[in-house]
Image (cartoon, rainbow, N blue to C red):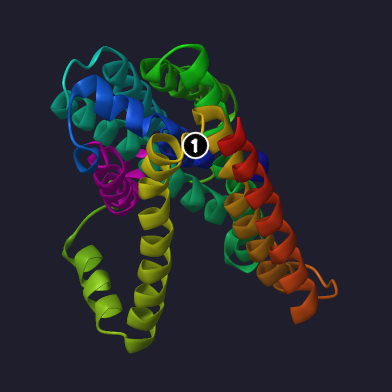
């Protein structure tokens, strides 16, 4: 269940990060400014959020499996539309549909884990799933960079579509509902009142503000980095994808270091060990960047 949830949940994250090396090529092909092409990332993040908020409650009414398969079908449809898009507007619409499907599938799989493991064991299962999902941003930019060099930016959408179709087949064969659909469940006035209570909680708002600032910082970097690295510094798309592996592995390491003591009892790295690890990763990234400039 955890492996299946990670596979289904990571497809949305993969499609976002695999696109990063292609942003300068898309801006050039569509003859638009870089900030216009960045809408492919910013609007897709909003679409992922809407997918999480809107679709998961529907799975209570219609069943987890049905909604997951519908979400993955939307993801594949958005990927196919991105391949044939002839304008930036159509490409943004395709990317929004793709991201909505990926975000919806991710949120429903979280609910499926809660159904399967129950409230007592769901926390550790969700932590393990989130750790596995973090692998996607580590690999996706590298794959996207090589695909872009071998073919073109449309092939990046094709790659996401092929993987999405594979995940759809996997889910259709292996995913089963752990709870029956409840026709009386789903969005209601009581459902929206729950959001009102959350927004009235200072503790929740503090976590929300912290998470928002952290994610904003990350995506400010990853949306601007392709233009600086590829257009200004002359780094190849494949090397840029490899460079993004370093901040991704640092994020993955930080998540594991912070979350592992809550899941299993292991010695926590001290501050010096963490600082040494971050320094090592930074030096490796710098060496790779210097190599890209010299070539």
- Is residue 23 rendered to the left or right of residue 33? right
Q: Position of residue 54 (x, y in %)?
A: 26, 50
Q: Is residue 63 above or below residue 219?
A: above
Q: What span is colored magenta in the figure? A: 37-65
> Which residue is at a point 33% across and 46% down the rendered structure image?
48
> Which residue is at a point 77% across and 69% down the rendered structure image?
276
Q: Quadrant of the N terminus?
A: top right
Mark 1, residues whose alpha carbon is within 10 Å: few (<14), some, or many (≥20)? Answer: many
Find numbered disc 1 in the image and state the secondary structure of the residue it sits on: helix
Residue 173 or 140: which is nearer the viewer? Answer: 140
- The residue beneath circle 1 is 14
Q: Position of residue 180 (x, y in %)?
A: 45, 43
Q: Single out the residue that lies furthest toward the bottom.
A: 202
> Which residue is at a point 40% across and 45% down the rendered structure image?
228
Residue 31 or 47: which is nearer the viewer? Answer: 31
Residue 209 picture quarter:
bottom left
Magenta stretch contains residue 39:
yes
Residue 288 picture quarter:
top right
Label the magenta part by its dominant secondary structure: helix
Q: Position of residue 221 (x, y in %)?
A: 41, 55
Residue 142 picture quarter:
top right
Q: Position of residue 101 (x, y in %)?
A: 34, 35
Residue 261 seen in render:
yes
- Is residue 142 rendered to the left or right of residue 283? left
- Is residue 57 rendered to the left or right of residue 252? left
Q: Is residue 206 above or below residue 130?
A: below
> Which residue is at a point 46% across and 40% down the rendered structure image?
233
Residue 177 seen in render:
no
């Amino acid at each position: 269940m955890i492996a299946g949830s990670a596979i289904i949940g990571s497809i949305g994250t993969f499609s976002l990060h695999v696109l990063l090396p292609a942003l300068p090529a898309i801006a050039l092909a569509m003859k638009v400014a870089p900030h216009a092409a960045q809408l492919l990332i910013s609007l897709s993040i909003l679409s992922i959020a809407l997918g999480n908020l809107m679709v998961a409650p529907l799975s209570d009414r219609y069943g987890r499996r049905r909604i997951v398969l519908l979400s993955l079908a939307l993801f594949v449809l958005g990927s196919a539309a991105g391949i044939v898009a002839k304008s930036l507007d159509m490409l943004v619409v395709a990317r929004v549909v793709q991201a909505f499907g990926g975000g919806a599938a991710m949120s429903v799989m979280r609910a499926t884990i809660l159904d399967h493991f129950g409230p007592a064991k769901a926390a550790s299962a969700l932590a393990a799933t989130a750790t596995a999902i973090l692998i996607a941003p580590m690999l996706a930019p590298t794959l996207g960079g090589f695909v872009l060099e071998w073919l073109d930016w449309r092939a990046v959408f094709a790659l996401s579509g092929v993987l999405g179709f594979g995940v759809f087949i996997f889910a259709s064969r292996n995913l089963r509902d752990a709870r029956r659909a409840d026709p009386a469940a789903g969005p209601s006035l009581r459902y929206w009142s729950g959001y009102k209570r959350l927004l009235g909680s200072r503790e929740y708002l503090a976590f929300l503000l912290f998470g928002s600032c952290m994610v904003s910082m990350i995506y400010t970097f990853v949306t601007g980095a392709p233009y600086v690295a590829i257009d200004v510094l002359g780094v190849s798309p494949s090397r840029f994808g490899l460079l993004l592996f370093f901040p991704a592995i640092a994020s993955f390491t930080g998540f594991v270091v912070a979350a592992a003591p809550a899941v299993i009892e292991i010695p926590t790295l001290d501050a010096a060990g963490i600082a040494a690890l971050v320094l090592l990763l930074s030096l490796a990234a710098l060496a790779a960047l210097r190599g890209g400039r010299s070539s």
